[in-house]
């Protein structure tokens, strides 16, 4: 059944979770993601799930820890300052290999910052965020439709790899309303057995969910196992979109809302006869190194555009590894780059 | 300390034959534990396991182990257990209980976990009236990290961070958690017990059993505070530590039912 509706990114994200069979949501109010919390409050009631407005982000992420440990598809969401509070719990979730979905609708920082869109939490999401060696699968939608699609996908990936998955959006994508198509048939959740879950030890040995591993050498072995898992995720789950790469002299690299602006800049440049392409990482971890490397064949320069002081640009530089130049244009604290602004930067490079 | 297997007053289970019999609870693994001589944790572990066995709920119990001396309680308990980050124990319990309401979910927390870093979680979990059981072991000191002041450390008590004794002016007052929680309508059964003597152990057993019964009957949030000995960081012999609870600790933290409804 095709069902076209008008939704903001926050609501689309929530509906994606519902389609994926999410049965537990805990969250704490923070702008600009409140529409998602309110949507889940309504939809969890309607679908027989559990909704809890927690006393803090700390409690919310640990309630998700409990629900995930019991084998249920669980989710929490927040925005930048709230995500900082969740980092302790995220480290435990990763250490315990508990699947869950996290959403960060980024806002301006550091500190309390403001409530305008930003991309300053890239490092936090992609490089770990909490303590210890771990990775989150990081999905970066750039439209309301993708919020629906990738949130549903996030639950499957989380279960498949027993790892938290984070949806990294921003206040612009979260609050902008767009038409989306809801096709339940396209989002049939891949439900897998969870023999490790805490369900009471009837007919089996007790299960223990823990990240404390004290025996000599055992924690290193556990870490090796985690790293092996991360390698296998990197091999199979990298996603990106490449536009006009084959003949491009200048390749724009941007994700999320900025990718949409950069796409318009690319089209303006093309209409002027300038050979400009775009790479849009969809998974920020694993990062699409190969797509970047392939573009090095024709590209004279990369221009990375972010709503940050320059975070993803470091991963682009690592992928390019000196083969060609990597330039950066960033806006911070809620500043949004315009199509013309990016075009000007492109023209300056040609 | 070896887990008491045969002759132990603490393990006494009254039977119909009127003669106490002793047995290893099914829910308690027959292994050595890491607790110091004279520590109360081994006794409280056993009381929890005896209660679980008596209700026949071992296969639907999910425990939450804290951060503190009881951090590896899952090595001693023979049922499903989750770890929790320090103090987040009641939040983890909430997540589990809400998605598995027919299972019996309990947290086992120390005074640092419950009364310092996890204060917000315990208050709001009680206030939501979560149908869980909380076992709160109060020995007035941080044992695992080497004997620092706890929120429940008594005035004048020497610890590694209150070298001349806890000063009320400098460090504030010992917190009475049960009395604080008692004002919350969501908290249904709150009792303080001790394990410093055989008599008190039996009373502790009754309270812990009642706290589990409350949950089984769906009556809501229940919490038992157990005053417990820490001879190592009280710098006492086990007997001196037990006497200290009787003569000093229990005069500040009165034993008995704080609230029952």
Image: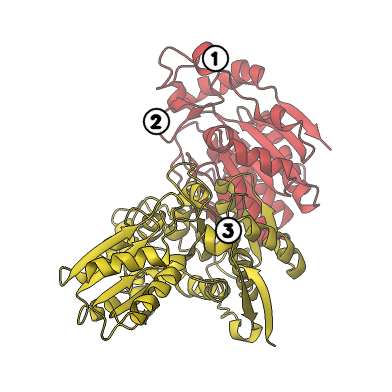
Chain colours: A yellow, B red
Which quadrant holds residue A286?
Answer: bottom left
In the rendered structure, the answer to whether residue A84 lies left or right of residue B22 reads left
Q: Is residue B218 visible?
A: yes
Q: Closer to the N terminus: mark 2 or mark 1?
A: 2
Q: For the point 45% across and 63% down, which residue is it? A: A97
A260 vs B139, nearest the viewer: A260
Judge left or right: residue A245 versus residue B198.
Answer: left
Classify mark 3: helix, strand or loop: strand
The residue that disc 3 covers is A76
Residue, disc 1:
B155
Give the distance between the C-alpha atoms of the residues marked 2 and 1, in whole angstroms.
19 Å
Q: Which of the chains bears the disc numbered 2?
A: B
Spatial separation of the CA atoms under disc 1 and disc 3: 42 Å
> x, y (%) of residue B25?
61, 51
User: Same chain for marks 2 and 1?
Assistant: yes
**Are there few (<14), some (14-19), or many (20+) residues within 10 Å of tag 2?**
few
| Position of residue B257 measured from the top left corner of the image (x, y, whole percent) | 76, 30
Quadrant in the picture for residue A123: bottom left
The nearer-to-camera label among 1 and 3 is 3
Which quarter of the figure is the C terminus of chain B placed in? top right
Instruction: Find numbered disc 1 in the image and state the secondary structure of the residue it sits on.
Output: loop
On residue B146, the disc is 2
Task: Tell me which chain the residue with mark 1 is part of.
Answer: B
- Place of residue A6 in the rendered image (x, y in percent of width and height, measured from the top left): 67, 73
Whether callout 1 and callout 3 share a subunit is answered no
Q: Which mark is residue B165?
A: none
Q: Nearer the viewer, residue A335 or A50?
A: A335
Q: Quadrant of residue A237?
A: bottom left
Query: Label 3 marks which chain's residue?
Result: A
């Amino acid at each position: 059944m095709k069902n076209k509706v008008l939704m903001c990114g926050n609501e689309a994200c929530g509906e994606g979770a519902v389609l994926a069979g999410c049965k537990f949501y805990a969250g704490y109010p923070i702008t600009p993601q409140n529409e998602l919390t309110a949507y889940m409050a309504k939809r969890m009631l309607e679908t027989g799930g559990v909704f809890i407005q927690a006393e803090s982000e700390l409690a919310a992420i640990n309630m998700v820890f409990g629900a995930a440990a019991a084998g249920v598809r669980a989710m929490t969401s927040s925005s930048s300052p709230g995500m900082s509070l969740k980092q302790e719990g995220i480290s435990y979730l990763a250490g315990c290999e508990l699947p869950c979905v996290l959403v960060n609708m980024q806002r301006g920082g550091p500190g309390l910052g403001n409530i305008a869109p930003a991309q300053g939490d890239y490092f936090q999401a992609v490089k770990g965020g909490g303590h210890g060696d771990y990775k989150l699968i990081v999905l970066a939608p750039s439209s309301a439709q993708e919020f629906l699609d990738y949130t549903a996908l996030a639950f499957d990936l989380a279960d498949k790899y027993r790892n938290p998955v984070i949806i990294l959006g921003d206040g612009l994508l979260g609050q902008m309303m767009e038409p989306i198509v809801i096709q339940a048939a396209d989002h049939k959740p891949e439900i897998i057995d969870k023999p490790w879950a805490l369900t009471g030890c009837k007919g089996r040995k007790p299960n223990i969910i823990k990240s404390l591993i004290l025996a000599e050498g055992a924690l290193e072995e556990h870490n090796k196992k985690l790293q092996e898992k991360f390698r296998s995720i990197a091999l199979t789950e990298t996603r990106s979109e490449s536009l006009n790469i084959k003949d491009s002299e200048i390749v724009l690299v941007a994700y999320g809302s900025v990718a949409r602006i950069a796409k318009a800049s690319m089209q303006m440049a093309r209409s002027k006869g300038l050979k400009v392409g775009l790479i849009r990482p969809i998974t920020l971890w694993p990062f699409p190194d190969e797509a970047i490397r392939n573009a090095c064949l024709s590209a004279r320069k990369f221009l990375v555009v972010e709503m940050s002081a320059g975070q993803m640009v470091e991963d682009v530089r690592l992928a390019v590894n000196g083969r060609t130049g990597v330039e950066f244009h960033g806006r911070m604290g809620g500043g949004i780059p315009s199509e013309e602004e990016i075009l000007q930067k492109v023209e300056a490079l040609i | 300390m070896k887990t008491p297997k045969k002759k132990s007053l603490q393990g006494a289970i009254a039977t119909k034959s009127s003669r106490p019999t002793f047995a290893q609870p099914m829910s308690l693994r027959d292994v050595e534990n890491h607790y110091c001589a004279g520590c109360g944790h081994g006794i409280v572990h056993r009381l929890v396991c005896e209660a679980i066995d008596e209700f026949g709920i071992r296969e639907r119990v999910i425990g939450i182990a804290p951060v503190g001396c009881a951090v590896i309680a899952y090595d001693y308990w023979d049922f499903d257990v989750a770890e929790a980050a320090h103090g987040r124990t009641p939040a983890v319990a909430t997540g589990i209980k809400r998605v598995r309401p027919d299972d019996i979910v309990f947290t086992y927390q120390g005074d640092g976990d419950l009364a310092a870093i996890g204060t917000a979680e315990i208050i709001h979990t009680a206030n939501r009236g979560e149908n869980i059981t909380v076992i709160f072991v109060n020995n007035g000191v941080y044992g695992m990290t080497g004997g620092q002041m706890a929120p429940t450390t008594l005035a004048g008590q020497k610890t590694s961070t209150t070298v001349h004794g806890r000063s009320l002016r400098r460090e504030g007052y010992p917190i009475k958690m049960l009395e604080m929680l008692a004002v919350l309508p969501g908290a249904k059964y709150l009792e303080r017990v001790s394990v410093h003597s055989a008599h008190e152990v039996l009373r502790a057993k009754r309270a812990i059993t009642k706290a589990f019964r409350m949950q089984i009957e769906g009556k809501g949030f229940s919490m038992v505070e157990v005053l417990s000995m820490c001879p190592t960081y009280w710098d006492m012999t086990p007997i001196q530590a037990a006497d200290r609870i009787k003569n000093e600790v229990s005069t500040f933290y009165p034993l008995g039912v704080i609230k029952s409804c």
